[in-house]
Image (cartoon, rainbow, N blue to C red):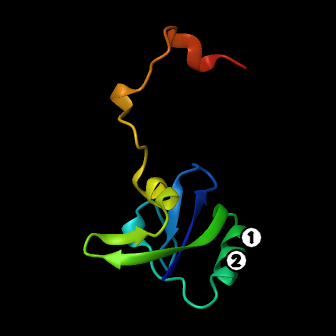
């Protein structure tokens, strides 16, 4: 099956085509059918999604499973626990301009 994914134009969130709109949840994704390019062109033109593309996926007992590891990471989020990530020594470091 082919499902459609991209990023929400306003928030940057990863989103998935539901057949009627977009969702942040991969399990809401549906098969895009025979002509995913037409859906992608229409949705990008309407500025609802950016960077959209079709991917291979399958339906398992756990829901929709993207075929490629990159897409599974996009669907499920960071692969590192945020509480274990390095924190800047200077709290203002996040505001630095490089």
User: Which image quadrant: the C terminus?
Assistant: top right
Q: Badge 1 is on which residue?
A: 45
Crowding at dot 2, Cα within 10 Å, few <14 / some 14-19 / many 20+, comes out as few
- Marker disc for residue 42: 2
Query: Quick one: label 1, few (<14), some, or many (20+) residues within 10 Å?
Result: few
Image quarter of residue 8: bottom right
- Residue 80 versus residue 40: which sits nearer the camera? 80
Provide residue 70's location: percent of width, then percent of height: 51, 57
Image coordinates for residue 38, horizontal then vertical, percent: 69, 83
SS state under label 2: helix
Q: Residue at x 40, y 62 (%)?
A: 25
Above or below 57: residue 87? above
Residue 52 in picture, x, y percent from top left: 64, 66
Q: Residue furthest bottom?
A: 34
Residues tagged 1 and 2 counted as in contact (Cβ below 8 A) = yes
Instruction: Reply above or below: 65 against 24.
Output: below
Left/right placement of residue 2 relative to residue 29 reads right
Q: Residue at x 50, y 11 (%)?
A: 91
Instruction: For marks 1 and 2, give the CA distance.
Output: 5 Å
Q: Is residue 19 left or right of residue 41?
A: left
Q: Is residue 13 left or right of residue 27?
A: right
């Amino acid at each position: 099956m082919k499902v459609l994914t991209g990023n929400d134009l306003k928030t940057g969130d990863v989103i998935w085509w539901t057949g009627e709109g977009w969702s942040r949840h991969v399990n809401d994704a549906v098969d895009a059918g025979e002509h995913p390019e037409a859906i992608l062109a229409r949705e990008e033109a309407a500025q609802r999604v950016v960077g959209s593309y079709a991917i291979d996926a399958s339906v398992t007992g756990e829901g929709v499973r993207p075929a490629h590891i990159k897409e599974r990471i996009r669907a499920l989020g960071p692969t590192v626990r945020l509480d274990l990530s390095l924190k800047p020594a200077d709290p203002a470091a996040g505001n630095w301009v490089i």
